[in-house]
Image (cartoon, grey):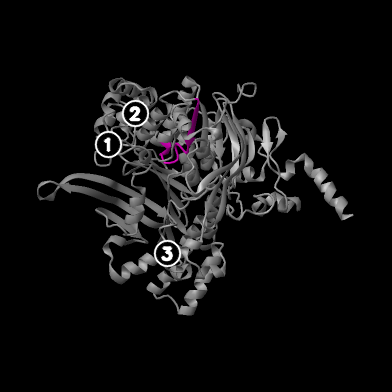
Amino acid sequence: MNEPLKTHTARMELIQVRNLKKYYTIRGGFFQRIKSCGKAVDNVSFDIFDGETLGLVGESGCGKTTIGRTMLRLIEPTGGEVYYEGNNIFNLSGGALQAIRRNMQIIFQDPFSSLDPRMPVGESIMEGMRINRIGTRKEQFDMMIDVLRKVGLEDYHARRYPHEFSGGQRQRIGIARALALRPRFIICDEPVSALDVSIQSQVLNILKDLQEEYGLTYLFIAHNLSVVEHISDRVAVMYLGKIVELAHRAELFYNPLHPYTQALLSAIPIPDPAVKRKRITLKGDVPSLFNPPKGCRFHPRCPFAKDQCLVEAPPYREVQKGHFAACWLNE
Amino acid sequence: MKIQNEQPVLTVRNLKTHFFTEDGVVKAVDGVDFDLYPGEILGLVGESGCGKSVTSLSILRLVGVPGKIVDGEIWFEGKNLLSLTENEMVAMRGNRMSMIFQQPQTSLNPVYKIGDQVAEVFTIHKNLPKKEAWDKAVELLHLVGIPDAEKKAHAFPHEMSGGQAQRVMIAMALALNPTLLIADEPTTALDVTIQAQIMDLILELREKMGTSVILITHDLGVIAEMADRVAVMYAGQIVEQATVQELFARPHHPYTKGLMGSIPVLGKVTRRLEVIPGSVPNLINLPQGCRFSPRCKARIEQSLEICLHENPMLVETGSNHLCRCWLYDGQMKSAGDLMEANHE
């Protein structure tokens, strides 16, 4: 780590998420009454600073993808606010919303299903510019060629169809598509988890280069902690719809305060047989969102659970400067 | 490590499995050799399409049309599996050798109770009466760490989580104490905390039952924590093979080195990751010479000509260390001399 620790105090928050909630309900029985309610995102607040990468990790079903999609209003939230440069996205509609959305783009996990199979990729990339009426047809075309080159593809690729590309190339097209509108903020939703390792590193390097060149801000959603550590400035850890810990990358990986983060870190296999670690193996499975445990949601699997954890959920607060956690052990 | 002096459990020689498609012959496995010793975990690593799964399906003779094993020998318990009849092979599978798959939930039959599915192994192979087989199944479910096994045996696959379903698969696979277990990406579909549980379980059962395991994965971390020896595959062939300590301490093949450099490692943050340029070759139109040569940085740096014309052999390059690369081939010098002599 040669880079200096970035000081966030002086930097502007580009995105502020406040008390974000997204509940899913299951209806059934007489009069389709609500039978149960799954809190996929339950009262989550965090900031993303201009120019940084915030990593968001957690296991499947913890709500990380739902957070990303509600932030763009691809899914309507149940409650809470998301501010982009001080404007609450949830209060906007029509032209004002479209103008803000230009600045907020997303890259999806599956490069095989996120491109229109009947559209040449050049058209796919220009689609956003056309919808937003940016520039003339000629300018759109030049811009498209420019972003294609930026992600390491050739001009002639523009005329080809998605099925002619490999997974890694398709993911580059997905990046080009997000980049074409010159956004300031990109949500990367598991952008490399469908790729082979040798291709994964190519895509991660492109994302880093683009961030440097354009000063992009990323929310990087992934389940692979090694990838998140590599790319992020700060990291948030989610468990069952709640953020349990958030800190600067180095702080989180060397001084994890939440037992879930500690277990998650110790569960990752290290590609070095010389390293022998004591693994904290968590018992049991992740509970269902529709029937979360009372008190702290992690307590049935937590090696340090005490009486208080069974009845009362711990507050999520700044335990040390810039280091947030929700655990009774730190209270 | 207790290997080397013992007789191998499984010997694979010059295995070739090709798929005869409309577009041409896909050489998915093209000349694979390895040995598996008693109680050992051999890791097979490589990227998608390198032939690691087809290798394991070939050992069980489960390759379907248009695939065909076109050459080679697979020796297991004194028999060449490729010369057995289908009936003899059926008796072998599930009994002496078994397999667990990547997607545990799709590998289980959705309309049968899991207890029945595990018990089936005993009724088919051991002719046990139903009640006795059920009791044995419950005992096994308990052994693989399913909580409340008596009750859970009555559950259907959709009522189980991915981790639990994989435990059921492991119970089925190990029911008759087979000599050989093939685990094809057993933890890839699982979350990390569940992956850790399943890895611990496989290691523990190997210790208890002495099963030899072929562990197929693309995750070098899983390999480092579980395998005794490792074979790295690329485009249908093994390109490097060594003990796990040796491979990670001294990787020889440029592909192995590239793979290790391209994964982010927890706790070791670098500015940039190494990149292997290009992508995996098309198995119908393989590059001439060494199959890795179009992507090989070492070839370009050292401007090796031979790599483009001739595929190197898998040769011994250290103790318990095999590598398929002209850089490490003793013959290269002489071959190089020969080329120079021809020039003169």
The answer to whether B202 is drawn above or below residue A13 in the figure is above
- Residue B215 lies left or right of residue A316; in this view the side is right
Q: Answer above or below: position of A297 versus A305.
A: below
Q: Secondary structure at mark 3?
A: loop
Disc 1 versus disc 3: distance between alpha carbons? Answer: 47 Å
- Please tell me if label 1 and label 3 are on a single chain: yes
Q: Residue at x 50, y 68 (%)?
A: A160
Which disc number belongs to residue B120?
Answer: 2
Mark 2, Cα crowd under 10 Å, few <14 / some 14-19 / many 20+, is some
Element class at badge 1 = loop
Q: Amino acid at mark 2?
A: Glu
Q: From what the image shows, is residue B303 above or below residue B68? A: below
Residue position marked by numbered label 1 in the rendering: A313
- Asked if marks 2 and 3 touch (Cβ < 8 Å), the reply is no
Instruction: Let me know if residue A257 appears in the view.
Output: no
In the image, which is nearer the foreground, mark 1 or mark 2? Answer: 2
Label 2 marks which chain's residue? B
What separation in Å lies between label 2 and label 3 (alpha carbons)?
44 Å
Task: Tell me, for residue B250, which label it has, or none.
Answer: none
| Amino acid at pointer 1 | Ala
Region of the chain picked out in magenta, as a range: B179-193
Q: Nearer the viewer, mark 2 or mark 3?
A: 2
The residue that disc 3 covers is: A117
- Indicate the quadrant where residue B201 lies: top left
Instruction: Identify the amino acid type marked 3.
Output: Pro
Residue most toward the right?
A: B344
